[in-house]
Image (cartoon, rainbow, N blue to C red):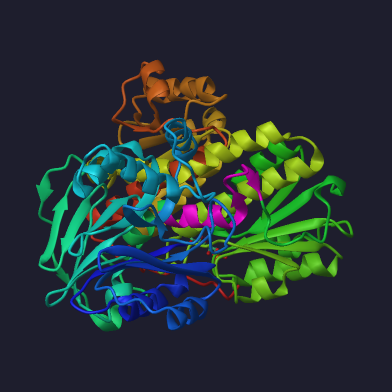
Amino acid sequence: MCGIVGIVGRDAVAGGVIEALRRLEYRGYDSAGIATLEHGRLERRRASGKLVNLEARLAEAPLAGAIGIGHTRWATHGRPNETNAHPHATARLAVVHNGIIENFRELKQELETDGVRFETETDTEVVAQLVSRNMDRQMGPVDAVAAALPRLRGAFALGFIFAGEENLLIGARHGAPLAVGYGAGETYLGSDALALAPFTDAITYLDEGDWAILSRAGAEIRDASGAVVKRPKQTIATQAFRVDKGEYRHYMAKEIHEQPEVVGRTLAHYVDMAAGRVMLPEALPFDFARLTRVYITACGTAFYAGLVARYWFEQIARLPVEIDVASEARYREAPLERDGLTLVISQSGETADTLASLRYAKSQGQHTLSVVNVPTSTIARESSVVMPTLAGPEIGVASTKAFSCQLTVLLCLAIAAGRARGTLDAAGERRLIDALIRAPGLMAEALTHEGAIEILAREVAKARDVLYLGRGTSYPMALEGALKLKEISYIHAEGYAAGELKHGPIALIDESVPVIVIAPHDAVFEKTVSNMQEVAARGGRIVLIGDAKGAAEHGLETLATFTMPAVDAMVAPIVYAVPIQLLAYHTAVFMGKDVDQPRNLAKSVTVE
Ligand code: F6R
C-alpha cells in the first residue's frame, strides 16, 4: 500500500521525508521517491526497490528544499520501476498518490486528445496532467486542484507541491486516509499519524472528501463542496503508534473504514490494472486446467469467504468446489485425490482446525494454497503456495478488512482459474477486472451510508432475534452478517438462503424480528423479492440492503432500505461487506458492548 508524506518546513526537508517514509515501510512498497523545490524549481529523486536505494540517490545528488513530498509505491498501474515511481511531475507541479484512479483511461484519452503526452503507465500521471492543464488555463494551484478533484473517481489520497510556491502543499482524501500534522512553523501531511510521529503528536485526520491547503502557518481544510471546515485536532499518544485507532473509537471501526484502501492494495498485488489481467505473483505448482475440483476449508468468517468463492470458481472457471468448515474437514477423512488442490483461508494463519485440515490435505498428496493475512504464520509456512491478503494487522476480534481482502484474493484466483481453464476469455477477464478495480471506490461510497445505518442499529438493538436472507453469493453474505451481529452484540441472529425460508425459519417471523435482506439487483433478485413478500405477508419488518434498481422495483414496505452503488454481480460481495459490518458494529456500540474484544472470543483460535 502506498504511503504519502509532505512537509512545508523551515529548513531542508529531505531527511525528514525519508524518516517519515521509513515509518510507512510496514505498508509494503516496491519503489520510493521524493520531490522538493530547489529555488522554486521542482527536483525529484526516485528509485526502485527499498528506501536505501533512494537514500543512495540523495547522497549522490542531495536536495536542499524546505518543502517536499515523498512516497513509497505499491505498483498498481505499471511496473515497479523508477519511471513509474512517485512523485509524478509536470513543469508546474509534483504529485504523490495512494490508491486507484478508476477513470484514468477515460481522462488519459481526453488529455491526449488535447495534445498532452504521457511519460509513464501510471494513473497518477493523469492527475498531474489534469491539474497542470487547469493551470495552463490560467487557474492558480488551489483552483486547479479544486477543479480536478471532482473529476477523479476511485479511492485515493493525494499530495501536491507546485513550482515557485515555497509555502503551499495540498493534500486530498477520497477513500484513502490522510492526516495533517502541526509543528512549530512547519506543517505536515501523512498517510497516517505514525509517519508524522517524529515531528508532531498534534494531528487532524481529514474526513472523507476533505482536502487541505497547507502552509508553514498551518492548514486550511475544505470539504468536498469547497467550503472551509473545522476538523478536530487530536493529540496522539506516541506509544500507541503502529496499531493505533487513529480517529476512530474502536479498532473495528477503523478496520471497516480502511477497507477501500486495503482492498485496493490487495488488488494492486494481484492485478495488472493497465493490462486488465490477473497477475499471480507466484507460479502455481499445479495447473487449474487439469483439476477436477477444488477443496476449500476454513473457519468462521474465513469459511464464509470460501462459500462466496465457491460461486466464483463454479461460475467463472466451471470448477467444482467442495467446501467444509475446518473442524469437520479435519476429521471427515474425505478421500482427496493426489495432485488435487486444497485451498485454506485464514486471517491469523494459526487457526488450529484450519491448520490440521491443511496437514491432512498434504498427507493425501494434495497441493495446498493458503489465503492468509499473516505471512509469517504457520499456515503460510506449511502451504505450498501462499496468497497473502494485504489487509495489515487486524486487531478487532470480529474480522472485517481481512474478510473483504480474502474475497478480493479469491476472486482474482477464480479469474486466473477461468483463464487457465478456457472458460473466461480476455474480454471477459478485462470486464471483471474493470469491475474489480471499481470495488475500493464503491466501498468508500458504501461507507457514506454509515449515518443511516447507525440510526437503524438503534432499532435492531431492541430485537431478540434477527434473520439475514440472501441468494447466490448473498447467501454466504447473510451468514456473515448474522455472525458479525451475534458475535459483537450477542443478539441471536441466523443467516439463511432466502429460498430456504419456507422450509422452517418462516415460523420465526413476526413484527419483533427484523429480517435483513441482502439483495443486489442480480440474476436472482426477483426470486429474493418473492421471499421478501413472504416475510411482509407475515408482518415481518424488512431491511433491504440492495441497490437503486432493486429498490425501485420491489414495491414492498421496508423498515429501511440501504441503496448500495450499482456494482457488477460478481464483485457485489466485496462492496456489500461494508453495510453488514457497519450494522453489526453500530448495534453493538449502541448496546454498550465491547466491540473490539467481545466476550468469549479470541482473535487467533489456536485450540480446536
Ligand atoms: C468472526 C471471526 C472468526 C474468524 C475465525 C477464523 O468475525 O473473526 O469467525 O474468522 O475464527 O479465524 P482465522 O481467519 O484467523 O483462521
Q: Is residue 308 left or right of residue 468?
A: right
> Residue 310, image x and y in percent?
67, 44
Residue 205 seen in the figure: yes
Q: Is residue 216 left or right of residue 148?
A: left
> Residue 462, image x and y in percent?
25, 45
Report the residue at 49% width, 20% height from top: 530
Residue 99 painted magenta: no
Q: Is residue 213 left or right of residue 402?
A: left
Residue 276 painted magenta: yes
> Residue 193, image x and y in percent?
28, 71
Camera-side residue of 319 and 486: 319
**Above or below, comparing residue 301 to residue 547 in the picture:** below
Report the residue at 39% width, 55% height from top: 89
Q: Quadrant of residue 133?
A: top left
> Residue 366, image x and y in percent?
83, 62
Residue 393 seen in the figure: no
Residue stretch rendered in magenta on the structure: 261-278
**Above or below, comparing residue 507 to residue 89 in the picture:** above
**Above or below, comparing residue 422 to residue 281 in the picture:** above
Q: Is residue 592 left or right of residue 75?
A: left
